[in-house]
Amino acid sequence: MLLGVHVSISGSIDNAVDRAVKLGCTTFQIFTRNPRGWTYKKLGKKEVDNFREKCKEHGYEVAMAHMPYLPNIASPKKLIYNKSVKSLITELERSGALGLKYLVCHVGSHLGAGIDAGIQKVAEACNTALSKIDNDTILLLENMAGQRNSCGSSFEDLRRILDKIEYPDRVGICLDTCHLFAAGYDIRSPESVEKTLEEFDNIVGLKRLYAVHLNDSKGSLKSGLDRHEHIGQGEIGEKGFQAFINHKAVRDKPMILETPEDKRGNFETNLKKVRSLYK
Ligand code: ZN
Ligand code: MN
Ligand code: MN
C-alpha cells in the first residue's frame, strides 16, 4: 500500500524524509518551501542531494509536492495570475530537481469571472508552465470542494481543462475525498463509491487518476466546505473510506493524508485507521 502524509520540511527539506520514515509512510507529500508567502529561497545543491539520497536510501520512488497556498491559476486578475503561473513554473522545476514524481495543484477560483474564463486560465497556466519546464514531474490537478466560484469541483470541469492541455502525458488528476464529498459526490457506502468512481471514469477517465488525498469531511454532502476531518470521524465515515481505498481504481494509487493534528487525533492515529481499513 502506498500510504503517507503531508510531512513538514521544517529545518531542512531532507528532514521531511526522516519524518515520513518515522511515521512508517511508504509515500509522502511536502511543500518545497513555506506555503504561506510568494517568496522562497532557491534550492541549494547540498539540500537537493541530501533529499534525493535519503529518498533512495528509504525506497521512496513515489513522493509528491503540493503547490503553496497563495497561487490561483484560475484568477482573472492579471497580477495574481502572472504570479501564480510563475509559482507553478518554479514549483514544477523544484519538484523535478528533488526527483518528486508529482506536483499537486488546486485548480482554483475564477472569482466571479465565470467557469469558462476560469477553465481557460487554468489550461493556459498549465500549458505555459509545461512549455517552460521539461522534466519528469507530472502535474496533478486537484479537484476543488465546490466553494463559490471554484473551478474544477466537478468532473466535467476537470474534463474540459484536460481537453485543453497540450501535454496530456504530463498532466493528471489527484482526487481529494473531502473535496469530492463537499462538492456533492457521495462516497459514504460501497455503492456510492462505485457510482462516483464510475462517473469519474466516464467523464475524466480513470487512467488520468494518479494520486488521492484521504481526508474526512467536517462539512456535509455538497456543503462546499473545504474542512478536513480525521478519517472516520467526519461526514464520510469509516464505511466510505473502506470502500474507497479498497476500490480497484484507487487501491494501488499513492494515498496522502492531510488530516488535522489535534486532541482527537494526529497523523499516527489516522495512518493506523487507514491501514486497518485496507484489505
Ligand atoms: Zn490540496
Ligand atoms: Mn488535498
Ligand atoms: Mn482541502
Image: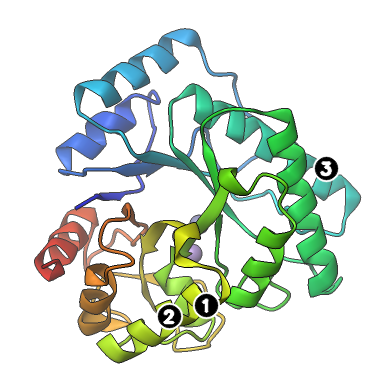
Q: Is residue 224 visible?
A: yes
Q: How many residues crowd around disc 2 within 10 Å: few (fewer than 14), some, or many (20 or more)?
A: some
Q: Nearer the viewer, residue 135 or 233?
A: 135
**x, y percentage for residue 40?**
62, 28
- Above/below status of 7 relative to 265: above
Task: Give the left or right position of residue 20, taking residue 175 as reference.
Answer: left
**x, y percentage for residue 162?**
66, 59
Q: Earlier in the sequence, mark 2 or mark 3?
A: 3
Q: Nearer the viewer, residue 258 or 52?
A: 52
**x, y percentage for residue 7?**
34, 42
Residue corresponding to mark 1: 202
Q: Say what amino acid the circle numbered 3 marks.
A: Asn
**x, y percentage for residue 48?**
43, 17
Q: Nearer the viewer, residue 91 or 71?
A: 91
Q: Say what amino acid the circle numbered 2 marks.
A: Glu
Q: Secondary structure at mark 3?
A: helix
Q: Secondary structure at mark 1?
A: helix
- Above/below status of 30 relative to 241: above
Q: Secondary structure at mark 2?
A: helix
Q: Whole-Å distance between the Cαs marked 2 and 3?
A: 36 Å
Q: Which mark is residue 82?
A: 3
Q: How is the image coloured?
A: rainbow
Q: Is residue 68 visible?
A: no
Q: Whole-Å distance between the Cαs marked 2 and 1?
A: 6 Å
Q: How many residues crowd around disc 1 within 10 Å: few (fewer than 14), some, or many (20 or more)?
A: few
- Quarter of the image for residue 26 reads top left
